[in-house]
Amino acid sequence: MKLDPFPSRTAAGVSRTLGQLLKRVGDVRKEATGDGNETPIHQVLELDDTNSDVPSSIPFILSFNNLTYSVKVRQKMKLPGIINQRRHHHLGPGTVADPVAGESMFTTTKTLLNDISGEARDGEILAVLGASGSGKSTLIDALANRISKESLKGTITLNDEVLGSRMLKVISAYVMQDDLLFPMLTVEETLMFAAEFRLPRSLSKSKKKMRVQALIDQLGLRNAAKTVIGDEGHRGVSGGERRRVSIGIDIIHDPILLFLDEPTSGLDSTSAFMVVKVLQRIAQTGSIVIMSVHQPSYRILGLLDRLIFLSRGQTVYSGPPMHLPSFFAEFGHPIPENKNKTEFALDLIRELEGSPGGTKSLVEFNKSWQNMKHTPNTEPDRHGLSLKDAISASISKGKLVSRATNNEASRNSMVPTFANPFWIEMAVLSRRSVTNSRRMPDLFGIRLGAVLVTGFILATMFWRLDNSPKGVQERLGFFAFAMSTTFYSCADALPVFLQERYIFMRETACNAYRRSSYVLSHALVSLPSMIFLSFTFAAITFWAVGLDGGLSGFFFYLLIIFASFWAGISFVTFLSGIVPHVMLGYTIVIAILAYFLLFSGFFINRDRIPPYWIWFHYMSLVKYPYEAVLQNEFQDPTKCFVRGVQIFDNTPLGSVPTSVKVRLLQTLSNTLGMKITSSTCLTTGSVILQQQGITDLSKWNCLWVTVAWGFLFRILFYLSLMLGSKNKRR
């Protein structure tokens, strides 16, 4: 017999603690996985000395009883069907056409979970099996508190105590079916950022790095530690390695409960086996592992401790894999010796689902078989500890490393909702965003190119405008186009949040950080690029166009462009929080910005806008920066824009000879009783502002309003994240 040098359990069957396993951090147990990779025993940091008063093993049992979950779905019905239903409905009450309570002729109730019961224990893997649509993911969501309490019926308890939502977030982790990772971060960076989110500030940087390195070894990712995750356009790690990274970021704090939605989906046989082998190591250190799996191989089946087979939301088998042959033999369908047990079971279930009676006979047999095989189960000794005390004791033995502290009082008062204060979260979020963006400079490069091209075209198109009446019209056109283009160039910020929406939902679902921290860091990270783009555009256009104001005028012009970028990007960011698709988002952004430009006051003055549309004028984001730059340009009372004969430039008399215009001025002077010569100033900047209807706010007030719009949209973005990212089924 070959002895295991570092058994996960002692001879007495008691699980070794994570602290004890850490003492063997340099040792590795090799497993024959088929690809030569190593699967070290699960290890975490021991933060303090082991308390001899705490029992060596704290058993946990997650029990769920009579779980039932139904949803209303729309039913497609043709017109003859509706007429027939109405006709039957008028026959009187009690007919078969009467809708069930809570239903109508347009909706029907579909039961996704129907009276599901079972239990999962620490040290074991509970696997939920079934065909597609059987309710596997729904059951995982129910156990992980991802279904609203109003919709889910039944009870879920841990050690006979009902788990609160806050407590469950602290002690559990949920690994989604899709691998939601930042593509340009390496494996080591991804796990390190997860450690900085989930591990407390009281834990030193070196210990966090030790935890990450131990986790990399445990997951068999040592060779890929410096490789980027990758995506469709960038080559990165393999599918199996990506899946193990997804698991790693959720087990960085070593949770007591681990939920996984089809962790082997899309993987080859060897990669899938290695993933489940890692899960077995995690379970053997005192965690409860619950996973859904579509069709496990023979090797994977040997790693599973308990199975639940589902068929259309009902339990058709619940028990250990070793009891499958006797179960189906007593049902009358013995499993052939050379047949995979789970494949035979799933094939039989699918065959019964297609029969007239469905799986009703198998469901009823399972109930009777469970009652017949059930023996009074002696509950494991929990040493007289409540759930709260058991969790605290488990923390002291190495579990939930992210929540452990050296302060015993803090340990007894359980754990905070978040591992770090919000400024630490902001710093880590900002650093991660900068790291990921720095390796994908395409977005900023495209925006900078757009600003450079637009600025160059405007500078050459409106080169050195004069102060004639035509120059005034050209300045108005320049400002309207420049301000609207500033907002339109912000539209390419739309995919930024949409690409990481589900990463954000996954991380906030487990309280990795606060939503407010994400919103603030998102705003702070965008500021440097906005400042650079604003300065680039202002420097290209201000002196080339010949705008007025000198250095002070340039400084305000720069500020208003920066405020426009701030308001525009904040507006687009808010839309990305409520619009699920990029193309739909672009359509909405372009349409709304066009309306903003229409009501800005350039095409039609404020006093000419119909009263029923005036509210849109004051909501226009383009209005305030447009009015601000006009006031900055025409604020000098000594600067004249129309002198003497220039009064005729924009009239049909503009083409007549100058001598005729002079005689007309003399005639006009005699009529008005005032002398008007060729040098007489007839229109100053203040007159132009009055003609444009710009009299409400000063240029500085317009600047503050533009900045305030940006803050308002950031607040709305935060509210959209609060309301739209609950990640729960209704």
Image: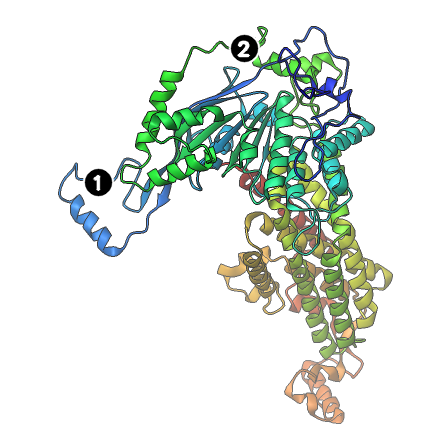
- Marks 1, 2: nearer the viewer: 2
Q: Is residue 388 above or below residue 721?
A: above
Q: CA distance from mark 1 to mark 2?
A: 51 Å
Q: Position of residue 519 (x, y in %)?
A: 67, 42
* Quadrant of the frame with the N terminus: top right
Q: Position of residue 45 (x, y in %)?
A: 75, 23
| Front position in the image: 70 or 217 | 217
* Quadrant of the frame with the C terminus: top left
Name the residue rendered at 82%, 64% in the picture: 539
Comes first in the chain, label 1 or label 2: 1
Q: Is residue 641 above or below residue 619?
A: below
Tell me the residue that label 1 is attached to: 98
Name the residue at the left extreme: 91
Q: Position of residue 560 (x, y in %)?
A: 74, 57
Query: Is 195 on the left or on the right of 128, as rendered?
Result: right
Tag 1 and tag 2, C-beta contact below 8 Å: no
Tell me the residue that label 2 is attached to: 380
Mark 1 falls on what kind of element? Answer: loop
Name the residue rendered at 43%, 36% in the picture: 344
Circle 2 packing at 10 Å, graded few (<14), some (14-19), many (20+), is few
Query: Is 321 on the left or on the right of 628, as rendered?
Result: left
Residue 79 appears in view:
yes
